[in-house]
Amino acid sequence: MSTITSITLLGILVLFLGAMKKQTWLLPLILAGLVISMVLTVMDWNSFHSWYNGMLIVDNTAVAFSTVLIFSTFLIFSLAAHYYRGVQRPLEDIYGVMIFALAGAVMMTSYGNLIMLFLGIETLSIALYVLAGSHKEAIVSNEATLKYFLLGSFLSGFLLFGIALIYGSSGSFDLHRISLFVASCAGTYPPMFLAGLFLLIIGLSFKIAIVPFHFWAPDVYEGTPTLLTAFMATVVKTASIVAMYRFFTHTFNGIHGVWETTIWILAAITILLGNFTGVYQPNLKRMLAYSSISHSGYMLLAIVSFGAMSDNALLLYSLSYSIATISAFGILILVREAHGNDFFSSMNGIGRTNPLEAFCLTVSMLSLAGIPPLAGFMAKYYLFTTAIEKGMVWLVIIAIAGSAISITYYFKPIIAMYLRENAGEPLKVEWAYKVHLAFMTLALIIIGLAPFLLIGLL
Amino acid sequence: MFTQYIFYFLTVMALFSAVMVLVSKKPIHSVLFLTLTFFAIAGHYVLLNAQFLAVVHVIVYAGAIMVLFLFTVMLLNLNKDERSPKPLWVKIMAIMAGAMLLLTLIGVFRGYDIKTVNDPLTTQIGLVKELGRILYHDYLIPFELSSVLFLTAMVGAVLLGKKEQINK
Amino acid sequence: MSTLSAIPISYYLVFCSILFCIGVTGVLIKRNALLILMSVELMINSINLLLAAFSAYTNDPAGQIFVFFIMVVAAAEVAIGLAIVVLIYRTTHSIDIDVLNKLKW
Amino acid sequence: MLTIILILFPLALSLATLLLKKEQALRFFVLGGALIEFGIMVAAFVQYRTSCHCQLLFRAGWLTNMGISLKFGMDGISLLLVALTTFLVPIIILSSFSHTYRRPATFYSLLLFMEMALVGVFTAFDGMMFYIFWEMALIPAYFICAVWGGNDRIRITFKFFIYTFAGSLLMLVALIYLYFSTPFPHSYDIQDLYAAVLTPGEQTWIFLAFFVAFAVKIPVFPFHTWQPDTYTESPAAGSMLLAGIMLKMGIYGMIRWMLPICHVAVHRWGPAALVLAVAGIVYASVIALRQKDMKRLVAYSSIAHVGLIAAGVLVLTIHAMQGAVIQMVSHGINIVGLFLVIDLVEQRTKTRNITDLGGLALKAPRLAIFFMLILLGSIALPLTNGFVGEFLLLLGIFEYSALFSAIAGVTVIFSAVYMLWMYQRTMLGPANDITAEVRDLSRVEMAALIPLIIMIFWIGIAPGFFLDTALPDVMTILSYAR
Amino acid sequence: MMMNAIVFLIPLFPLLGFLVLGAGIRVIPRKVTALLAPGMILLSLISTLVLFIGFHPSTASQVHQLFSWIRIGPLDIPFAFLIDPLSILMLLIVTGIGFVIHVYSVGYMKEDPGFNRFFSYMNLFVFSMLLLVMGANYPVMFIGWEGVGLCSYLLIGFWFKNHEFNNAAKKAFIMNRIGDLGFLMGMFLIFTTFHSLDYQVVFDHARGMTPGNPVLAGITLLLFIGAAGKSAQIPLYTWLPDAMAGPTPVSALIHAATMVTAGIYMVARSNILYILSPATMAVIGITGLATALLAAFIAIFQNDIKKILAYSTISQLGYMFVGLSAGAFTGAMFHLTTHAFFKALLFLGAGSVIHALGGEQDIRKMGGLKQAMPKTYRTFMAATVAIAGIPPLSGFFSKDEILAKAFEYSPLLWVFAVAGSLMTAFYMFRLLFLTFSGDFRGTEAKRAHLHESPAVMTIPLVILAILATFGGLINLPALFGGNAGLEYFLEPVFAASGSVAAHGTPLPPATQWLLMGVTLAGVLAMAAWAWKRYTAQHRGLLPDDAPRTFAERVGRNKIYIDELYQLVVVRPLMWLSKFFYEIVELRFIDRIVNGVGSLVVRTGNTVRYIQTGNVGFYMFVMILGIILILFFNILI
């Protein structure tokens, strides 16, 4: 509760500051505010509150994932100073909308009622429609926002339909009451309820970018301003997958068998398609989009193999994925700035001119690819473990086939940076940015070496 | 009996105008048919004893949203035919997809019935007082948080609509 | 004499489904972003009605409350949507979705 | 404790190396460090008591709730391979002094990092640790080969990476699967993995997964195609690391993990794998006959030799297993020696093409002598290290099947054919334009070669020391595998 | 204790010599080498003599263990030496002839820049050969077995600037390796059968086995493959003529006197195994005989002095195998010994001739050398007479013993053996007459240069000539009133097999005399024919050197065996290599692997086009997905 309050207040404060023309205070305030709300969130650890008739449930899962979300946002805002360097217009609106989006995301992690879920999703989505189009004169940004908006509102129609059907069959929006209804069904569920369930899954799948509801992702990622793409690829995905997870844990645990096959198939095709499509991309940003699609598939593994460790696995995965992705986007911002595009060829020889940046990108790529001892490996390992524990060996084999394929594109930037001849001037990076990148890289290594810091939490 | 006739009338009107939204060549006609649909739906709300909802619906949709649409159509001077409508096969595919979806949904509803029909006269759930009580009591948090959503939308609309130089 | 006793809920279900599917078909058929948005509004309205019907038949106000929220969201969405449409029109002088496909592959 | 020091010390060195700027100091530091590491290894050897299993154990919880612990230790087999690693790394470092690598600090850092990973692989007594170190060894190997390699390095090394990585992912699945088959509470501890309860069907799958992972690394025919290209394109140090130490990981993995865990499947499917290994011996030997590129020739010869080792591991006889262990060490020494000589030749003549060379013995007799000695080891002349290994391997295979042994034995003939051909065409004959101005070995180069020669004859003449070290543990493994 | 020390000293000296020379290859002056290398062998010879004198044949053979070499459970291979009559005989031959040849080499290699290298190799060779004959088990024998192969390789290719020599060296090594693989497999079979590789254990166990045991047949056949390689028998003999590329002393020591006889030694050593395997014995007999005849036939048509001697060696080795197959182990060893004497002498004599002619080896360009090189001529003639089997020289007795045994075994065998023997006489006398009689046919420059070799070379010739002449006495048969000393000496070694072998009735003396007479008459006739043809008429040496008859053409071309091998083995192998590499490796396996990779890339490239960028399309697919999910989950 204090999380949402503090974030919302922060957002409003930012807007006020903007109105008061205090641009320089914006980022420090935001970063401090995020830290404060992170602290507030963490203080809710082990408190297990249920607010306002079960509208918000603040349990450890919510706390943990909210922290991940705020942390990711924090990391992204740390890149903002560099990214918006030299921009003349006031930025409080973009920042404010980002913070509101974060509030929506946090709602999605701690909802206890489908209304809250819906509100959270819509807050997040509307904010993102805006953010995607925030580079107004760029035609790609326009296109991105239009695509995202049309598809998003279309799919949220289905989500709503699903909620309506669930309401119609169970008579409530409250997760607890729905779970009671599920229990009362004793194995035979009305088709309407199942339809609602699947439409809800579909609606969330869209946000997570799961095949075949992923189509927006590559185009929108590519068109969106890079900093906000990072936000989209991490915060939105984490929030949505957690929303889905929460939904399942709180209500539909009992009917595991019903959705298992579907999610299994979705996970499999997502992993395969995401990885296959990534192979040919000549462009880092778009490649990261496909990578994020495939990672959605991996995260689905945690849900399909729902078990005692799933939440831990998901936590580790989302955190490591987020950090690695933001780190990659951090470098991407630099490359784009220097070369005006994000083709791999623009990264040629960075390994020599900017060893630190190249190293950071390498680590993040290796982590995304799941190579030990980095965070991404441990995360994948936990996912695979949970899946194998549930006997889904074939799904895991598909997943590792995907991992093997993914090497082909994760190594492209590495090869470009280290093995190709230099293309131009060194990237110009200020020290704070470097520290930030190094921090993320270090985090990936530390999480990889000491996953027990996170793994026993939930 | 009378209510039944009203039901059928409203239903047919809603469906007809909904189809007309799609069929109309000019966006302005579509907007007008959409408004008609909204009114029909408002009538349904009344039939369902959701009077307050009906009122809000008319205000929000017919009043606000449709005006926005109209305004946009005027502003962008879109009141002309679509430049090149989608090819026929796409339309047929779309209609088939819609029909398939419909079949699926109807299949889903098969066999569904509400067992206990309450007498709406005894419970006044559709009335302002009752709804207000629940809204400000049980659903306070969503209510408050919807303001965040509005704020976002507001800022966002300004951000997008404002004509000026932005960053990259 | 109440509507609720005269008309089975399945009528509403079917009606709402048809309306929803018309909306979906509209989304698929149209190239004009504005009209797609309108079709989405049709879909959302059908859901609203469905919820209201459920709410009425079960005598549970939650459904109607939800409808309020949906309206709120729909309004916000339309506001943003129209802003986007205007934005697009400003840069491309078209709101045809098929024209906008620079981002692909 | 020594075990973990053996792992951490190179890591510390690797990180410290990055801080050094001056090349001379760097070399001194790296070589000194590697020698200290070797010294630690010697200390471990001294502490080690034969005929008592896994020793010098380091154990710490890491992910205890997941059954993963930091369990490192050494038994005889590990000890020998760690000794091999720590012995070869200083030599590889020394041999790289004659090159001026770009960004030497990074190069040496990667090299030491790789040493860390290799030691980790050989000492891990926890399944997940084994896997983690296994993969960690791949990254520096990739970078060493890709950054400092030849013209076609990008494509080749990438193939190498993805091939071996894909193989090892299967192993990961197998390990996780095994984890859940261990007695409760599940763990990756080697003893628990050995005790895993598996149906024959499960065994088969796990065997396959392990086999593919290891076969790619070893490499066993027909999983070998990454190998000749990679060796050819890698810098000398990379080839030495890959061929000398890294491919031992695969054989070691077979011995340590595959045989005891899937013993039923090994009995059932081992013959099929054996056929591959034996076919690979002949196949690679025959191909080696016509290779013009020295490195490529040695690469194919290596496939043949390690195919023999793999075959020896799979027949599950004590002699073959002992032979495999000793041959792992011998092969490491010999192939490093061969690559070293090839590198020396290439440095001097700027070519590795056998037909372009000739008459080096006239200009560089010392080089020729060292080459001959190493060559003798690799064609398994008695009293060299190669003989002990091949003798035991062939004997062990013979005990399993005379036919396989005879087929595998053709390596004895073919290796003489291609090795002598290479020797003759490069060292002997009249000198030509390319070889006319070649200088003989310098002191540093000799210093790198002499330890190898000593080892070649030590193992060849008195293999008892090595055999006895490994014997109890080989027996243990075999008792599991049977 | 004393014994022990001496036993170890014997191989130690040559090893020491090798190590010292090898280490100081560039430092040690020639004079030191000239003393050191033969000196070491001399010390070794002295040790052997001490051992021999202190050894009584009736005492049991002694095993001296140096250290445990390879030991894994039941597999225990000690580095141990066996001293018994057989090994002592071989030790004497190796060190004795080795020493003589070392001395000779000092003169022969005087001018060579690789002097030190040569002697280090030679010492290493002697060391390896000593290991071979002294080993107390098969693996130690194998050490020497391969070691001599290596030295042979090094010495054949001693003048390594010439690629033809290198090729010859490589060929020798590889053909030996083929045999060695058989040897290895034989050892493995021995181990799996007897669980030991130790001579004593193996032979003790074997003694209890029934003759004709297939396992024994297998063992012996496999071992014989090794012997065929080392002792240049069909089909692995072609390396030996080529091996003449090496310096002549090498040919004398390695390719005539010692190394090539290792196969004989090995079979004799394993006599008990062989005697129990009649099938193998038959194979050996046929192979030996065929080799003897084939090589003799080829020798007749060769013109290179060393090549003739090489084929002669092959032929004589064939004889020894015939003897072995007939169960005449002592006879074979006897012939081995005498052959070592006279063949070494022949080679050294040939070396002396080549030395005098400045490297000329073609006998057609020689002639009339007996005036210029009387010592060489005389010693050479002694050797020729010996090898031709003319009494009372050594070759007569040893060959006769084999022939007699062959007759016992089968008269047919005897007929063939005698035929070979006649051919031997012919080509040897042809060689002798063409080289030393008549007029000199070389250039004038060469004629001027003709000279007798220095003493350091002729003294060894004389020593060997004495041995070749009187060597027969060591095993003078009872028929001639001798005491069959060698037979008695070797008795303990062959006793067991003697008891196992079926005892045919010994030939009556009359038959023996008759046979001997027939052979001798033939041999003399051959000698006479050769004299007539090559000295009196000078036929057979056409100026244009065109082979006239079919036999001549075939013989001149070594029956095209090399070409045959080229066609049957080498070319197919090279073709296979090419096939494997270019088709299987590159077009198939590599292509599959790369194909998987490019399939991924191509799939990626294809799949990405579903990302059309068209929102309408996206919506369609999504709707389809939704319908499918709902349909399959709810309605089915």
Image (cartoon, rainbow, N blue to C red):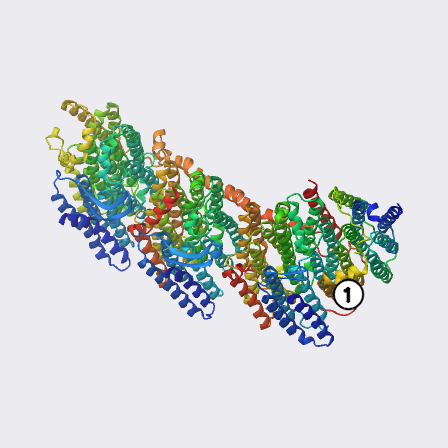
Q: Which residue is mark 1?
A: B157
Residue D200 relative to residue E345: left or right: right
Residue A49 relative to residue E74: left or right: right
Q: Is residue E386 visible?
A: no
| Residue D231 position within the rendered picture, expressed as x and y whole percent measured from the top left | 47, 53
| Residue A202 position within the rendered picture, expressed as x and y whole percent measured from the top left | 69, 51
Number of marks in picture: 1
Q: Is residue A245 visible?
A: yes
Residue A393 relative to residue D385: left or right: right
| Residue C46 position within the rendered picture, expressed as x and y whole percent measured from the top left | 79, 51
| Residue E448 position within the rendered picture, expressed as x and y whole percent measured from the top left | 26, 48
Q: Residue furthest left?
A: E481
Residue A244 relative to residue C57: left or right: left
Above or below: residue E151 compared with residue E548? below
Looking at the rendered structure, the kind of residue marked 1 is Ala
Q: Tell which of A300 and E148 is nearer to you.
A: A300
Q: Identify the residue shown where x is 51% and y is 41%.
A: E583
Quadrant showing the N terminus of chain D = bottom left
The kind of secondary structure element at disc 1 is helix
| Chain at tag 1 | B
Q: Residues within 10 Å of mark 1 (few under 14, many from 20)?
A: many
Quadrant showing the C terminus of chain D = top left
Q: Tell which of C102 and B131 is nearer to you.
A: B131
